[in-house]
Image (cartoon, coloured by chain):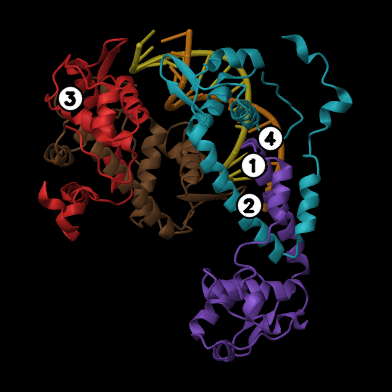
Chain colours: A brown, B red, C purple, D cyan, E orange, F yellow
Amino acid sequence: MIVLDYRDRRPLYEQITGRFQELIVKGILPKDTQMPSVRSQAMQLSINPNTIQRAYSELEREGYIYTIKGRGSFVADISGLLGERREEWKKQFMALVEEGQLLGISRQEMGRLLALPEPGDMEGKIEDKGGDGSD
Amino acid sequence: MIVLDYRDRRPLYEQITGRFQELIVKGILPKDTQMPSVRSQAMQLSINPNTIQRAYSELEREGYIYTIKGRGSFVADISGLLGERREEWKKQFMALVEEGQLLGISRQEMGRLLALPEPGDMEGKIEDKGGDGSD
Amino acid sequence: MIVLDYRDRRPLYEQITGRFQELIVKGILPKDTQMPSVRSQAMQLSINPNTIQRAYSELEREGYIYTIKGRGSFVADISGLLGERREEWKKQFMALVEEGQLLGISRQEMGRLLALPEPGDMEGKIEDKGGDGSD
Amino acid sequence: MIVLDYRDRRPLYEQITGRFQELIVKGILPKDTQMPSVRSQAMQLSINPNTIQRAYSELEREGYIYTIKGRGSFVADISGLLGERREEWKKQFMALVEEGQLLGISRQEMGRLLALPEPGDMEGKIEDKGGDGSD
DNA sequence: GTGGTCTAGACCACC
DNA sequence: GTGGTCTAGACCACG
């Protein structure tokens, strides 16, 4: 379910939280689904349990999962949460847009930025990083 | 040069800084142009000199103008500043866009938000507000 | 037994659950007492049976009542439940108090907050009052 | 400035964030004061830098400090923040109080809880901690 | 030098 | 078994 990209400059824990958020928001992981245990997930990705722990802590702090000590972590009910979050996001977005205009960036230009694919999305492309999987 | 909008919910000093930023960024006020003195500007707008003072302080803090004691305030050289600012802004923008996608907001939807005029911008237009369209 | 307050901003079902919780906690409705049927209660309050249904579901989920299909709903044995709940509540309370102190709110100030009646509490008293003092 | 209490069951990083919050809220550490570096603070307390790192991350997330990479962490301007936080806190407090009343806990009883010294507060008295004033 | 991330391995409390 | 905390030590990017 989770794939790590070591070429991505974002930290691992952030890739993990992002991916799980996506799965939860899209409903692929429904409410109350048990998350993989910290240790099993760490083994499956061949990384340190602490990294998973950190990712899960973030997810819990942001309301995407809830934790019962000794039992595990579970997908939270985000139905109410999402609406609020989106409103909050829109406010921030509009504020940033206005600020950008003050810097002389036109809305048209912003539109072009939106159309851009995310950097790092087509990883293999030009340089390909050479040694990649060396470790 | 500056017009205040008392319907705007933003504080006056913010309207003023915003407007001056725009004028400076667009090159209408070129580098080293002398800014109107605090007192004259205050009189011209019929507001308290403290408000102008605060606006100028903000502008100076943000690097748009510089002040020589006893002489007045002048438009700063923003050629270098602007590039950095824009880069910084773009980073923030792209980060916010990605965050929005995680909340399930499509880039298309963001585009629509961009197309919308900011609220408060057209106050005169829609309701027509009586005679204000005159200017 | 139940009085609705349409001036209250809380949803009706929440007013109902709250009131029943009070009645059960205070022992006015002892263990195994049969609850009014959904339909009769709805009629008595002149509201939609779904609202009562939802209130009862909440009460059941929280352990205040239990339901026997085809027979009705009955007040549960809360003797054990209440102790746990209270302990849990006290933990939360003490945690919140400490957090408040970190924000610079003194315990004395908190005491004053306690002395205040909650807003909206007296609305019913003034006008309607009705049978509330009955027990 | 910071003293750790190993008898306290709270995690170390939480003791540290709490103590710094207090120092910042009380104004003992004014705005823009540089925080001790992660490594120096860790050495001074004889604990692992990761623990300090975690504490500082929390403080930054909560708006008490800001960080400039490669430069250090600094006390943030909390003047605006505090008011909002307190309002938010009061809402939570009043909600919890109401919930407590539903559980049959009187406001008087809550008042008594407020008067209680925090548990773990007196520990130092008995043993006196020995020679802590060393620095 | 600074903060930030990650690993490896340990111990605790909870259920 | 589960999550949560902590240590020790490493490497990175930034300035």
Q: Can you tell which mark lies on residue B110? A: none
Q: Give amino acid for label 4.
A: Arg
Q: Secondary structure at mark 4?
A: loop
What residue is drawn where x is 80% and y is 45%? D115
Are dots 2 and 1 in contact, CB under 8 Å? Answer: yes
Please check whether the numbered discs 4 and 2 fall on a single chain. Answer: yes
Tell if the residue under mark 3 belongs to the same chain as the one under mark 2. Answer: no
Label 3 and label 2: CA atoms lie apart by 48 Å
Q: Quadrant of residue C89?
A: bottom right
Q: Amino acid at mark 3?
A: Ile
Left or right of C61: which side holds B81?
Answer: left
Q: Mark 4 and mark 2 in contact? Answer it, CB < 8 Å.
A: no
* Residue that badge 2 annotates: D93
In the displayed structure, D129 sits above or below B122; it is above
Report the residue at 57% width, 43% height from top: D86
The relative height of residue B123 versus residue B38 in the rendered view (above or below) is below
Q: Secondary structure at mark 2?
A: helix
Residue identifier under label 4: D10
Chain letter belonging to callout 1: C
Amino acid beneath label 2: Phe
Circles 1 and 4 on the same chain: no
Look at discs 1 and 4 and give the one toward the viewer. 1
Mark 2 on the same chain as mark 1 = no
Query: Which residue carries the number 3 mark?
Result: B24
Residue at the far right: name it: D126
Q: Chain of mark 3?
A: B
**Disc assigned to residue C100:** 1
Q: Residues within 10 Å of mark 1 (few under 14, many from 20)?
A: some
Front position among marks 3 and 2: 3
- At horizontal 67% and vertical 57% (from top left) the residue drawn is D97
Compare residues A47 and C53 and report the one nearer the observer: C53
